[in-house]
Amino acid sequence: MKLIILDRDGVINHDSVQYIKSPEEWKPIAGSLEAIARLNQWGYRVVVATNQSGVGRGLFDMDTLNAIHEKMMRATAQAGGRIDAIFFCSHTDADQCDCRKPKPGMINEIAARYNVSLAGVPVVGDSLRDLVAADAAGAQPILVLTGKGTKTADDPALPQDCLIFPDLAGVAAHIAA
């Protein structure tokens, strides 16, 4: 099985320093939904792994998070794509859980659920925590320059084998090549 793991905010949709707190605030990055559709056409299962500490902070509740994800799933379907699953961590840094990126717990859980080795599995993110989690799990970290990506590209802690692309459409084009 071919699997790709995507962060949500800054990769699929525009990010906000004040969090995406409602379906109305969720807006796709140009070309991201079509990139997911192309990945599906090439046989990839697309799974989202996203930190959502806004729930743990009380900024929005689970019903709102579900509504945001429902909007994302509908918009992806309208573009001809499919997101197979969404994994999320609602904890804050203070909770010191194993699932919150940069720890690899959420990515390891995806591998266990899909019964796959993470070797070579692309994990796409825009922040250092996404890439560190991918690296720690033994997956292939890929940085996109959308969201926080441009700032992240300059971080000296970037994993050595990290690939860098302008956006998710660039990642999809590379995978197809």
Image (cartoon, grey):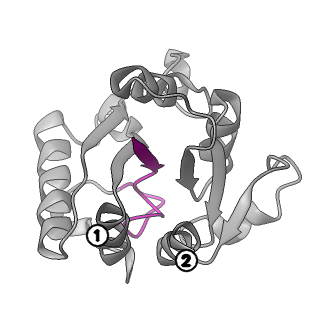
Amino acid beneath label 1: Ala
Tell me if 72 is positioned left or right of 129 in this view.
left
Considering depth in this image, is 147 or 161 the residue closer to the camera?
A: 161
**168 drawn magenta:** no
In reply to whether residue 18 is colored magenta, the answer given is yes
What stretch of residues is rendered in magenta? 1-19
Q: Quadrant of residue 177?
A: bottom right
Mark 2 lies on a secondary structure that is helix
Residue 170: give its label.
2
Q: What percent of the width, then of the height, locates residue 103?
A: 61, 26
Mark 2: give few (<14), some (14-19) or many (20+) Cα within 10 Å: some
For marks 1 and 2 on the same chain, the one whose residue lies earlier in the sequence: 1
**Furthest residue in direction bottom, as rendered:** 30
Classify 10 Å Cα crowding around label 1: few (below 14), some (14-19), many (20 and above): many
Instruction: Name which quarter of the figure residue 133 lies in.
Output: top right
What residue does disc 1 label?
A: 37
Amino acid type at circle 2 is Gly
